[in-house]
Image (cartoon, rainbow, N blue to C red):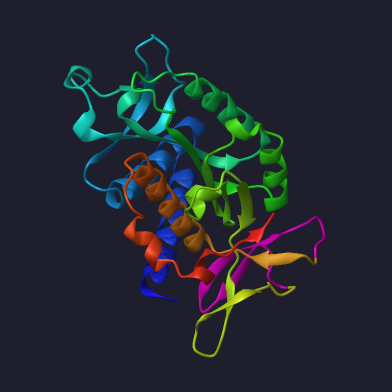
Amino acid sequence: MNIVEQYWSGVARRLQEEVGTFNRLIGHMGEQGRANELSLVQLLERLLPKRYGVGSGMIIDAEGSMSAQTDIIVYDAADEPAIMAQTTQVLFPIESVELAIEVKTTLDGEELEDFSKKKEKLNRLVSHRGTSPPAFALLAYQAQLPPTIAKSVRTISDRLRPDVFCVVTPGILGGRKRFLEGGDSADYKMGLVPLHARNSEGERVPGSWERPTNEERSVALRESIAYPATRLSARQEDRIIGEPGRALLIYSAALLRILSSGKSLGEPSLTHYLRPPAQELEEL
């Protein structure tokens, strides 16, 4: 495992630990959700180039329309009109918004439907620059079985699906190929990010995944690290180990690719540290 992958494995574990601690200590679901948003905000603020700001609020257009309350808004801080910065920032002109992100503690069909309604409202906003609405991403900390999530996403109209999404546990990833892989493909893909088997040199074996033993129910230990065990179908024997750190790394690279595409910049440097095997998914 290269140094970038090792680092992000630690980032994912820390994020999961923070969320678990917040959710144990805070009883009110609304407060839990806000605490989980703040954990992601802190990660983004360290990840994003300095030109971008991170806030929360509503996106507006010059026609008087407004988005739903948006958990995380990534905007071009150099382009943010000073007229909207005289009080606590809650309104963001669509012309300065580069990316919107919805955060869910637990993802299910109902939460996906809620996301699609918010995306529909965002899609209606009009930029006076004639540009498309900003990409709308989704991050959840946990979810149902991967096939169930994939089925729920497929029931949503393509234009209302998350442009890219990640479920940290067990490590579900999905989105438009141009954001996940680069290029200009409009196709949509989804998959579980599984833990690779390793060869004698410790390198990933392409297309070969770690499977839990019969005794390892929801958690599997590998090299003293706990990984989530999940199922790829309704069959109990079709079980696999997910790799949350790699899922979060690919998701973060996709977010940077979205921002780069909006500014017509080259590939983000982070993507060059994702070797081909590290980008593999078990497609759903």
Query: Within the image, what quadrant is residue 234 found in?
Result: bottom right
Q: Is residue 209 visible?
A: no
- Which residue is rendered at x = 75% and y = 73% of the image? 214
Please name whichever residue, 94 or 73, is drawn nearer the observer in this view of the structure: 94
Q: Which residue reaches farthest bottom?
A: 200
Is 50 placed left or right of 8 in the picture?
A: left
Query: Within the image, what quadrant is residue 213 found in?
Result: bottom right
Q: Is residue 278 visible?
A: yes
Q: Position of residue 241 (x, y in %)?
A: 63, 67
Q: Position of residue 133 (x, y in %)?
A: 44, 28
Q: Which residue reaches farthest top?
A: 64
Q: Which residue reaches farthest right?
A: 235
Query: Within the image, what quadrant is residue 8 found in?
Result: bottom left
- Which residue is rendered at x = 56% and y = 86% of the image? 199
Q: Is residue 27 magenta?
A: no
Q: Is residue 49 above or below residue 249?
A: above
Q: Is residue 140 above or below residue 59?
A: below
Q: Position of residue 34 (x, y in %)?
A: 42, 35
- Which residue is rendered at x = 39% and y = 27% of the image? 131
Which quadrant holds the C terminus? bottom right
Is 112 placed left or right of 82 in the picture?
A: right
Labels in figure, total = 0
Please name whichever residue, 248 or 250, is drawn nearer the observer in this view of the structure: 250
Which quadrant holds the N terminus? bottom left
Q: Which residues are magenta?
A: 215-236
Q: Position of residue 87 (x, y in %)?
A: 20, 19
Q: Is residue 225 magenta?
A: yes
- Which residue is rendered at x = 67% and y = 36% of the image? 109
Q: Is residue 15 above or below residue 8?
A: above
